[in-house]
Amino acid sequence: MTSDGTPDEATVLLRVHGSLARATLNRPRTINALDHGMVRVLADALTAWEKDERISAVLLDGAGERGLCAGGDIRAIRASAVTGDRRAADFWRDEYRLNAQIARYPKPYVALMDGVVMGGGVGVSAHGGVRVVTERSRVGMPETTIGFVPDVGGTYLLSRAPGETGTHLALTGAAVGAADAVYTGMADHYVPSEHLPELVRALAETVTEADVVEVVGRFAQTAPAGDLASRRAWIDTCYAADTAEEIVARLRAHGDPEAAKAAETVGGKSPTSVKTALAALRRARALATLEEVLEQEYRVSTAALAWPDLAEGIRAQVVDKDRRPRWSPAALAEVADTDVARAFDPAPDGPLGLAEPGAGTTRTGP
């Protein structure tokens, strides 16, 4: 049984509708949070469907009304960090490999990013070829809130968002709606949620891979306006600074009320996470492929298991829920550059083995 009482075998529902293979994340009580078993089921299903000539496309969605996926099972990650075992590292190895598998999937991979799509939920959706958001979508990488760093290819996506918008989202942990998800490159199409059942039926009737984008296009509309484009002036100016300390100082001094709010938000996150996330984003910009970025993220993730902030952040957010984490170090200026650099050292158990530098792929689609 999983932590929410759902039988293990039902945590991912696998079905075939016509030429459409459908995987539904099925832990609605936890907003379909991913555990290790779910990652393995998805990876095995994608492998099988890739070889099945009857399947033209794959669809990913989530059970319940709250969202596609709230992220990884962070209670389990905290338990692994506290005990010092390998469960979290083993989970991440398979999860990041799944993210790469999705990005290079040879058939159309349609992700319905309805409702909450956070952390690991971004990893199983935003690397797909056809990514659909709705008016209910809230897409984000909130890892700095729990003493962690954006992973699952999140630093690849955010480092390639327009200007410094990705840096803003990574350091604040802010979630965005449909229009800004498209604007930042985490989604492709906006479809009102009431039309999703009809879209799924239409995709099930699709005969060839080439028809998938055309079918989605028939349902797509212009999303209600977002906020990021109109805030680029202060976002790009402030987040272009070389250090996290200077970013916060620029945000405070800028004069725009939204910049001041961002400064307060960043100031409440784990200082170690903020400084490491900034370094990870800047390094990710220089890496050519998603696979290379995932390798880097694995090094950082395994290093974070030894940080006091990871267990403390999860405690404050989901265990005790007091929302009052006691970060250590407690201030950005107290986080040594050498400690940040150490997070990028090789992982104790070696690389993921996804690809040699320059030999991987970027996100693929029909």
Image (cartoon, grey):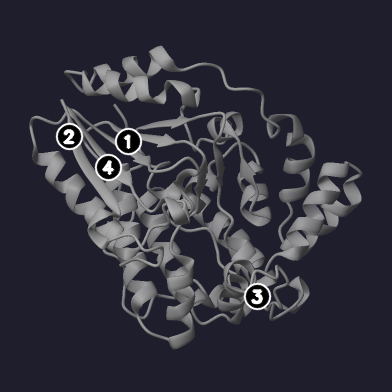
Question: In the rendered image, which quarter is residue 340 located in?
Answer: bottom right
Q: Earlier in the sequence, mark 2 or mark 4?
A: 2
Alpha carbon separation for disc pair 1 and 2: 23 Å
Instruction: Work out whether residue 355 or residue 334 is closer to the camera in this orientation and state it.
Output: 334
Res. 354 in view: no
- In percent of the image, x 45 and y 54: which residue is there? 29
Above or below residue 326? Residue 289 is: above
Q: Earlier in the sequence, mark 1 or mark 2?
A: 2
Q: Do labels 4 and 3 touch, CB within 8 Å?
A: no
Q: Point out which mark residue 16 bears.
A: 2
Question: What's under tag 1, amino acid-wise?
Answer: Thr
Residue 252 at x, y percent in the picture:
87, 53
Alpha carbon separation for disc pair 2 and 4: 9 Å
Above or below residue 77? Residue 180 is: above
User: Which residue bears the numbered disc 1?
Assistant: 364
Question: What's under tag 3, amino acid-wise?
Answer: Asp
Q: Regarding mark 1 in the picture, which secondary structure is present there?
A: loop
Q: Earlier in the sequence, mark 1 or mark 4?
A: 4
User: Which residue bears the numbered disc 4?
Assistant: 23
Q: Earlier in the sequence, mark 3 or mark 1?
A: 3
User: Which residue bears the numbered disc 3?
Assistant: 337
Q: Residue furthest front?
A: 5
Instruction: Work out whether residue 198 or residue 250 is closer to the camera in this orientation and state it.
Output: 198
- In percent of the image, x 46 and y 28: which residue is there? 188
Q: Is residue 209 left or right of residue 358?
A: left
Q: Regarding mark 2 in the picture, which secondary structure is present there?
A: strand
Residue 79 at x, y percent in the picture:
45, 79
Neighbor class of circle 3 (other Cα within 10 Å; few <14, some 14-19, many 20+) is few
